[in-house]
Image (cartoon, helix red, strand yellow):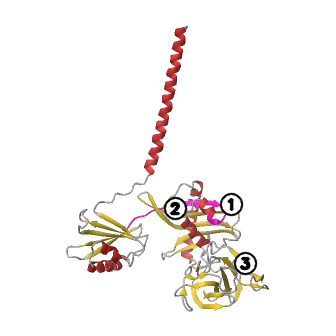
Amino acid sequence: MEKAKNILTSHKFVRAILWLAGILAILAVAVVLVFGRRGRNVDIEPVIPDNTTIIDVKSGDSLSKILSSQGINHNDINTIAKVLKDKAGITGLRADRDKIEFVRESDATDAPIEKIVVVPGPWRRVELTCDDAGKWDCNAIDIERDTRLVYRQGEILDGDSFYLAGMRADIPAGILADVYDLLAFEMDFERDVRAGQKFSVVYEENYHDNKKIDNGSVIVVSFDALRGNVKMYRFRKSDNTIGYYDPNGNGAIKSLKRTPINNAKVTSSFSTRRKHPVLGFTRAHKGVDFRAPTGTPIPSAGAGRVVARGYNRGHGNFIKIRHNGSFETLYAHMSKFAKNVNVGTVVKQGQIIGYSGSTGLSTGPHLHYEIIKDGKHVNPMTVKLPAINNLDAANKQKFLEYRETLDKAIEGLASNPKSFIQM
């Protein structure tokens, strides 16, 4: 009996050891898998050869300053600058964006320079070399992009702004800014955004060697606004010009923006009867006021010509722009005007014309914005604005075919948001 008991106890002990060994083996495999996956996702920094010096362009740097610091003489500096301008279209360096590589014949700090590489962004390299006769030449190399279309969708929740909802939907800040610019032609982000509204964006991600470098353009944007669904498609016409169009192929970019300053809060709406906050009596408020701290840049709502720039008691510093035969816009209470913006100046849509302030009859810094149509003031938030860059018949047919193909692809992306379309 005692012997049988000892054998039973021994079997239990062996089984316990085997069970523990199995658990440890499973844990070991899991650790290998987890850390193995992490290891494969770690970006390995490229090894810089000993004979290569890389200089990141900083504020205050110039081409002459950087080349001189590497021992290049004055005559060669002038020649290199001319070659870059004539053959590569490079006339200057951009701080915090561009960089220059110097490749020497050996790793000695005073070794002759074999090659200079100007890198004006992630998708272009300009290689400069000097032959035995001392003549400099350059070769511009465009780096091939692996462009992928990705899909993001979101919903406005209680207390949300579009920006917060977009960030929660994992839309990059730069893409959100582009979406703001597009939708501002149709929407007032202060009044048109409500809980429950859904939106989606299709945009480009650019890769090189299977590593994401940057984001590209917004391809499709859709927003369930109060006035109905707003949808825009990016399309290249037969002449290679690019625009945004609604689902029917009509130009989606209007000649004027309803809200010149993105994401600005409306503090006073257009009204035929409003009690003036300074004067104290009721009169028409012929524009819309947007809250904007002093110094906020004010972009022109559309392309046009400055027809008035000055000061009066009511508007303070103001600018008036004529856009075509029917439309004008006015911007008031500016703290100052932008340089080189005077009466007669032709401005582009989005060009900075001044800076917000509180000049004239004003209780605080803001932008007062008016739209005048055929000589009469109209509500910027409701007036029908003319589209620009409409498609002709041939391009419209191509667009409709393109839109149909793209919509089918988007259906696949929507059902599998982690997938992408290879361009």
Mark 2 to mark 1: distance in Å?
26 Å
Mark 3 to mark 2: distance in Å?
39 Å
Is residue 6 placed above or below 343 in the rendered structure?
above
Is residue 219 found left or right of 121 in the rendered image? right
Q: Residue at x 59, y 61 (%)?
A: 167
At label 1, the amino acid type is Leu
The crowding category of the residue bearing disc 2, from other C-alpha atoms within 10 Å (few below 14, some 14 to 19, many at least 20), is many
Q: Position of residue 183 (x, y in %)?
A: 62, 71
Mark 2 or mark 1: which comes first in sequence? 2
Q: Residue furthest top?
A: 1
Image quadrant in which you'd find residue 367: bottom right
Foreground residue, 120 or 78? 78
Q: Which residues are magenta?
A: 142-163
Foreground residue, 158 or 196? 158
Q: Which residue is mark 2?
A: 149
Q: Residue at x 53, y 20 (%)?
A: 12
Q: Which residue is mark 1?
A: 157
Q: Position of residue 23 (x, y in %)?
A: 51, 32
Residue 269 is tagged as: 3
**Would residue 156 be counted in the magenta stretch?**
yes
Q: Residue at x 57, y 54 (%)?
A: 416
| Local SS, label 2 | strand
Could you tell me which quadrant the N terminus lies in? top right
Is residue 217 found left or right of 121 in the rendered image? right
| Local SS, label 3 | loop
At label 3, the amino acid type is Ser
Q: Residue furthest left?
A: 132
**Would residue 210 be counted in the magenta stretch?**
no
At label 2, the amino acid type is Leu
Residue 9 is tagged as: none
Is residue 2 found left or right of 77 in the rendered image? right
